[in-house]
Amino acid sequence: RLIADLALEEDGILQSFPLVDLASRAAVDPFAEKIYAGHRQGVSGDVLLVMQPGWLTYGRTGTSHGSPFVYDTHVPCIFYGSGVNYGSTHSRTYIRDIAPTVALLLGAPYPNGTTGSPISNLLD
């Protein structure tokens, strides 16, 4: 918790989440819920950080793995080809559903660790 508190003193850090508190905070904090959904026990760090909107932790050109802000979480998702229904939707779709959807379209097994489900209104 000390490291999480110290991180908040740095420029660009909006919130910090000690892993030990993340599950309980996810129940009441929308950012914590998104961070919790994206963390992986044993792989993610002990303190998870949310940068200020528009800040990147990567110093070179390019991008990062996103943030919990709307400009990073509400993006187009386009599928095309055999087995895909024609049309569009504004239904809530989760990133965790993309891998099982692609696997189903390819006739392949779901990837290890898959937690989502195929996007049903997209499939023939």
Image (spheres, helix red, strand yellow):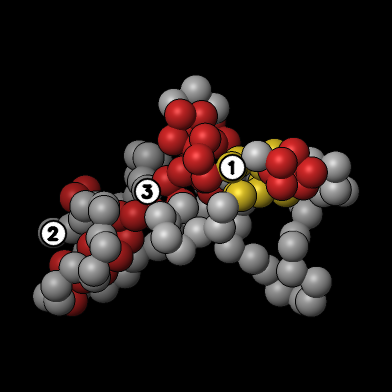
Residue sitting at 46 percent across and 53 percent down? Answer: 39
Secondary-structure class at tag 1: strand
Indicate which label's residue lies in the foreground, 3 or 2: 3
Residue named by callout 2? 124
- The amino acid type, in three-letter code, at marker 3 is Tyr
Q: Earlier in the sequence, mark 3 or mark 2?
A: 3
In the image shown, does 10 or 64 lie closer to the viewer? 10
Percent of width and height locating residue 86: 26, 58
Residue contact at pointers 1 and 2, CB within 8 angstroms: no
Judge from the rendering whether residue 122 lies leftward or rightward of residue 31; answer left or right: left
Q: Earlier in the sequence, mark 1 or mark 2?
A: 1
In the image shown, does 76 or 37 lie closer to the viewer? 37
In the image shown, does 72 or 110 lie closer to the viewer? 110
CA gap, disc 3 to disc 2? 19 Å
Residue named by callout 3? 94
Secondary-structure class at tag 3: loop
Q: Earlier in the sequence, mark 1 or mark 3?
A: 1
- The amino acid type, in three-letter code, at marker 1 is Pro
Judge from the rendering whether residue 37 lies leftward or rightward of residue 123; answer left or right: right
- Picture quarter with the N terminus: top right
Compared to residue 2, the image places residue 96 above or below, namely below
Residue sitting at 31 percent across and 69 percent down? Answer: 80
Judge from the rendering whether residue 66 lies leftward or rightward of residue 39; answer left or right: right
Can you see residue 30? yes
Judge from the rendering whether residue 49 lies leftward or rightward of residue 35; answer left or right: right
Residue 18 - label: 1
Percent of width and height locating residue 49: 66, 49
Indicate which label's residue lies in the foreground, 1 or 2: 1
Secondary-structure class at tag 2: loop
Percent of width and height locating residue 50: 67, 46
